[in-house]
Image (tube, rainbow, N blue to C red):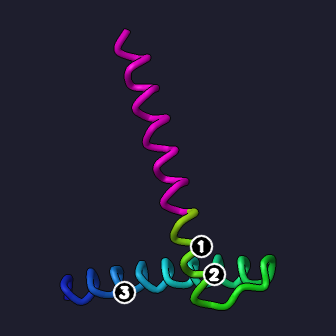
Amino acid sequence: MPKIATLDKTLIKKSREKNLANKAISYIQRKTNLSYNNAKILKDILSKEYFRKIRSKNKVFAKFMKR
């Protein structure tokens, strides 16, 4: 039983992530009139830059807290 429950949880998590990704892609398509593939590429680029900014801010904050 527990294996099935964990499998269900991972499937639900993956489907939620995919659903959010599709919503982001459709939003980009509506705002920019891009094709699906181009909107998907743009979403990936934007999310990578966003997370890179967060990581750099966290590093700066960690250095500040060490002082």
| Residue under the image location 52 percent in, 55 percent down | 49
- Residue 63: x percent and y percent? 38, 20
Q: Is residue 59 magenta?
A: yes
**Mark seen at residue 8:** none
Amino acid, disc 1: Leu
**Mark seen at residue 11:** 3
> Would you say the magenta stretch is mainly helix, strand or loop?
helix
**Relative to 3, 16 lies left or right:** right
Mark 3 surroundings within 10 Å by alpha-carbon count, few (fewer than 14), some (14 through 19), many (20 or more): few
The alpha-carbon separation of the residues under discs 3 and 1 comes to 26 Å
Q: Quadrant of the N terminus?
A: bottom left
State yes or no: discs 1 and 2 in contact (Cβ < 8 Å): yes
Report the magenta residues as a range: 47-67
Amino acid, disc 3: Leu
The alpha-carbon separation of the residues under discs 1 and 2 comes to 5 Å
Asked which quadrant contains residue 46, the reply is: bottom right
Q: Which residue is mark 1?
A: 42
